[in-house]
Amino acid sequence: MYLLMGLLSALCWGGTDYLSGKAARELGVFKALFVSQLFGLMMLSLIFFVFSIPFELQISGLLTAAIASFCNLLGMVFLLKALSIGKVSVVAPLVSLYGAVTTVLAIISGRQVSWIILSGLFLCILGACLASISPSHDGKRESPASVGFALMSSLSLGLGFWLQGEFAVKELGVIQSLWIYYATALMFLSLVVMGRKDVKSPSLGMLGLLFCISCMSLTGFFTLAYGASLGHVAVVTVLSSLASAVTALLGFTLKQERLSLPQLSGLFMIISGVVVLRI
């Protein structure tokens, strides 16, 4: 069962990244995020109500969760921007470097790091260089802006996940921290959308797409948490980190994105490095 949970998490997050690029291109980054976060908050609130999940607010945990949520929101904004202008198969693995960022923060905070983790960091850094500078077979280089946004996304998500995992989750709980993320994101995105005076409603088809994105994202979080609760945290986390490979595979097969040999080597190194960091 835990193997199925890990694979399902990877499939959901990989599909989420792939579909998010289409939504961002057609609707705009902030509006796409706003609608998807609204769906997510509604579903989480319904879960709290139906299952009567307790929600004890602690000031320290709430503040940490809010800061982590803001970092994760920035990461999502950068991710959607990168996906809207770049290749899915390059952007997704670059964003998965958040694992390396989290590891560096752990080292700075005093955690002992083995040579295996250092090897994973080296693979991630080298792979990022290869994936971002090499031209593809169609003669076009990957947009420098998309690479930059992808790397900024990995930095923001790495910091956000570290704060959330080290502090917020321990004080509030997994589901509670996730609810705070959606609520915080929706608050900031509401201000941005209202400031832009973009009140045009998305089409019915786009609403359906955004609802699917929200469902897959939430399912990814829940399956990861459930699989970890079965006592196989390392295995489930390794499997869930294959989301970048799922997204890249979707880009290769559905959009026929052609990559050069150095780019393919870089993507393989990034994915391998992420797996090593999760062991």
Image (spheres, rainbow, N blue to C red):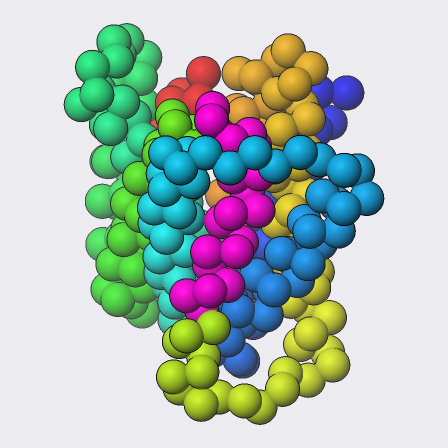
- Please tell me whether residue 120 is drawn above or below residue 15 in the rendered image: above
Name the residue nearer the viewer: 81 or 156: 156
Q: Residue at coordinates 36% horizontally, 42% vertically from top-left?
A: 63
Instruction: Assess whether residue 172 is covered by the magenta stretch.
Output: yes
Q: Residue at coordinates 64% horizontally, 11% vertically from top-left?
A: 231
- What secondary structure prevails in the magenta region? helix
**Would you say residue 97 is visible in this rendering?**
no
Q: Which residues are magenta?
A: 169-189
Name the residue nearer the viewer: 45 or 36: 45
Instruction: Assess whether residue 165 is covered by the magenta stretch.
Output: no
Write down the quadrant of residue 18 in the picture: bottom right
Q: Residue at coordinates 61% horizontally, 37% vertically from top-left?
A: 55
Q: Residue at coordinates 67% horizontally, 23% vertically from top-left?
A: 227
Quadrant in the picture for the N terminus: top right
Horizontal side of residue 92 vs 207, given as left or right: left
Q: Position of residue 66 (x, y in %)?
A: 40, 47
Write down the quadrant of residue 149 in the picture: bottom left
Q: Position of residue 49 (x, y in %)?
A: 76, 46
Horizontal side of residue 118 vs 6, given as left or right: left
Q: How many marks?
A: 0
Name the residue nearer the viewer: 224 or 245: 224
Q: Position of residue 173 (x, y in %)?
A: 55, 30
**Would you say residue 194 is visible in this rendering?**
yes
